[in-house]
Image (cartoon, rainbow, N blue to C red):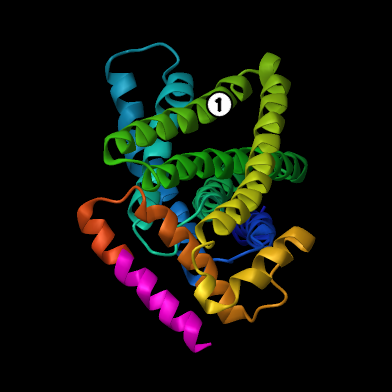
Amino acid sequence: MPIIVSVIAAIIPMLLYLFLIYKLDKHEREPIILIFMHYIWGAISSIIIVFIVNDLVGLSFSYLNLIFPTVLQVILFAPLIEELSKGSFIYFSSQNENFDNLTDALVYGAAIGLGFGMTENALYFIKFGVDVKSWILIVVMRSSFSAVMHAISTSIFASFILLSKFSSVRKRKFYYLTGFIVAVTIHFSWNAAVSFEETFWYGVLVLLFYILVFVYLFYYSLNYELKILNEELLEETSSGILENLNLFYKKSKRFSNLNKKQISFLIKLGFTKKKLKFATDHEKIKLSAEMNSLRNKLNSE
């Protein structure tokens, strides 16, 4: 198939997945430019890994005369290297003020994973789609499964990085390491299963389970956000908005009685108050100033 067709076939499904995930974020949708930046990083890191890191690992296997170097590379080293690459950007982007709740982590993590999957899929479509039939099969299988795996594994890693922001300093490294291990395990289990024809469908079943976990986490995160907002905004009664807000939570869990700016300010205030409980002394100064700024903005609306 022509290269341009393979590239388009790799891009369209990933953008559709990304749009769906973006729309699922009900309370405070992330800036599109930030989501796209994460998507682009995923796409770029895939190229770096494929053409530099994986090739070096493959050469090392060949030099040591190891048996089945390609299989070992795919099953053992690819998950470690790829999850570290994808997760590194999440770590730095988590310092951004927009990265302040579990839903954000799932969205940004998925964006990186889908970007990574897009580039990887394009390379596979070009290299292995030798005829129309094989090309269609590869497009369907990789778009339905492999790229989705990348989105899920990075989202889970991002979730643990997010949890570290709401924990004490001593526990943060634990969350980083745990998130990395879980992401690598997801990636490893998929690669191990699909590397052998006899276990391929076991891999599909495992991935379907991971998809259900991701959907549950997204649903849970949306409801948990409401819980945090209700708890953290109880003290903000002076604005006169909170009383109506709490009443509306009970009815429909939406904010239709508020304008968009009020919704945005309230949500940011609630999550900022939550982060303040686990912040260092240096972080508390910045967060307190941010809270006062949000209160002033609310009062001026």
Q: In terms of depth relative to the viewer, which is nearer, 261 or 154?
A: 261
Total marks shown come to 1
| Left or right side of 99 for 59 | left
Quarter assignment of residue 44: bottom left
- What amino acid is at disc 1? Asn
Q: Which secondary structure, mark 1?
A: helix
Whether 222 is drawn above or below 217: the answer is: below
Near mark 1 (Cα within 10 A), the count class, few <14, some 14-19 or many ≥20, is: many
Quarter assignment of residue 97: bottom left
| Left or right side of 39 for 194 | right
- Please check the rendered image and state whether residue 291 is part of the magenta-colored stretch, yes or no: yes
Q: Residue at x 71, y 32 (%)?
A: 208
In the picture as drawn, the residue positioned furthest to the left comes out as: 282
**Residue at label 1?**
191
| Left or right side of 294 for 197 | right
Instruction: Tell me where the magenta segment starts and ends, as one range.
Output: 288-301
